Amino acid sequence: MKSKRTIRIGILGFGTVGQGVWKHLQADLSALEYRLGAKLELVSASARDITKQRDVQVGPGQLTDDNFSIVNDPQIDIVCELIGGTTLARELTLQAFKNGKTVVTANKALICEHGEELFNAARDCNTHYFFEASVAGGIPIIKTLREGLVANRFSLIYGILNGTTNYMLTRMEREGISYGDVLDQARALGYVEADESLDLDGYDAAHKAVILAYLAHGRWVKLEEMVVEGIRDITTGDIAYAKSLGYKIKLLAVIRRDFDKNAVSVRLHPALIAKNEIIAQVDEVFNGISLTGDVVGETILVGRGAGQDATASAVISDIADAVVALLGAPPPVISEEDEETYKALADEVQLAGPESVSSPYYIRLRVKDQPGVLANIAKVFADHSISVATMIQEEESDSASARLIFTTHSASESNIETALKVISELDISIDTPFRLRVFKPGK
């Protein structure tokens, strides 16, 4: 009987995800080896503090505080980069490629900022870079785009890509908990990143949207070229108003391609979405992604988007693909290092500017409660071609101010921004106007 090749694995970063990968690999090792036709050996893992007590134990000498000892170990075939960040992680990944190693990563920020360089480096070094765990945790969205739905061109990809903010919005809607209180609870549960802006200001989900846009359309979009907005200014009042109008508020990534104009728009922002849409019903820490292809129509994937087990599952899936590649199997139909394919996908696609994007809007104003206020606001809207669909007025406790809630018919983003700037400069305005887009998948 032909002996099985042994594939040796090293893990950079032995935090929550790294421990999950080690734990689940050890638990299911025999079954995985049988399926892959190879022996797997966990060689070592790195951590900043190797004396720290951990839930997952490794063998003597298997834990090191020297990351480079793993990427430079000639016996290791696959390096799992799970340390996060974009500086040391980039350096270690490039060194691993130079040493001919296959790299598996869950680092969406690294791919977003340096993906083009890293994919080119992997190709130049004749190795591979796998990154399923970088987007949507346990949802196999990258495999779906590259393999399962390879026959499709995608006019629309949208969904919930951050479990923390989805958990917070769910609790605010379901229980009427204030933003501040639900944030404290999310922190206590360990849901919020150490750098809270990654979750709360939308950057974590925006990094993932960039990766999906590249996979679908071959174009790297920089964060500064996108609309990126978080959930900090959303109130329980906004959520209640949205509910009364038949909507829920979700933090949505939206990637829309106009094939006639050869333009793509990539955005990440909270939006009102009709509560009967499947994505609107994705709650708690779950993620949900809708893909509309020209062949298959709409496909929706829902699953846990974060946490040790969901992310570890995606990392191990990539390890399995890496093992298959090392055993000589051909790469996926569209592989991450296939530069020519992605150049063809991009085909000089342009980024759509704000002037080309339109939608209905939800607008909240706090104004002085005095005669003529509504007339002034109506004139500003009319001057900027904004048609009002509904209006609600509420007096506040001091009786000198009022809260006005408007929804509009479809209006251009540039017109809305200009109109709200004009309103904010009027004497009647008390607070900065707040607005949310109303997202309608078909438009």
Image (cartoon, rainbow, N blue to C red):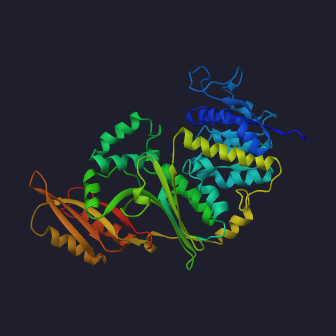
Residue furthest out toward the front = 1
Q: Image point 16% across, 63% down: which residue?
A: 393
Residue 18: quarter of image: top right
Q: Position of residue 103 (x, y in %)?
A: 71, 44
Q: Position of residue 97 (x, y in %)?
A: 76, 45
Q: Image point 28% across, 63% down: which residue?
A: 363
**Which corner quadrant holds the C terminus?**
bottom left
- Asked if residue 433 shows in the view, the reply is no
- Asked if residue 240 shows in the view, the reply is yes
Q: Position of residue 402 (x, y in %)?
A: 15, 59
* 427 to 32, vertically: above or below: below
381 horizontally vs 220: left or right: left
164 horizontally vs 219: left or right: left
Front-most of residues 280 and 358: 280
Front-most of residues 131 and 324: 324
Q: Image point 30% across, 75% down: which residue?
A: 386
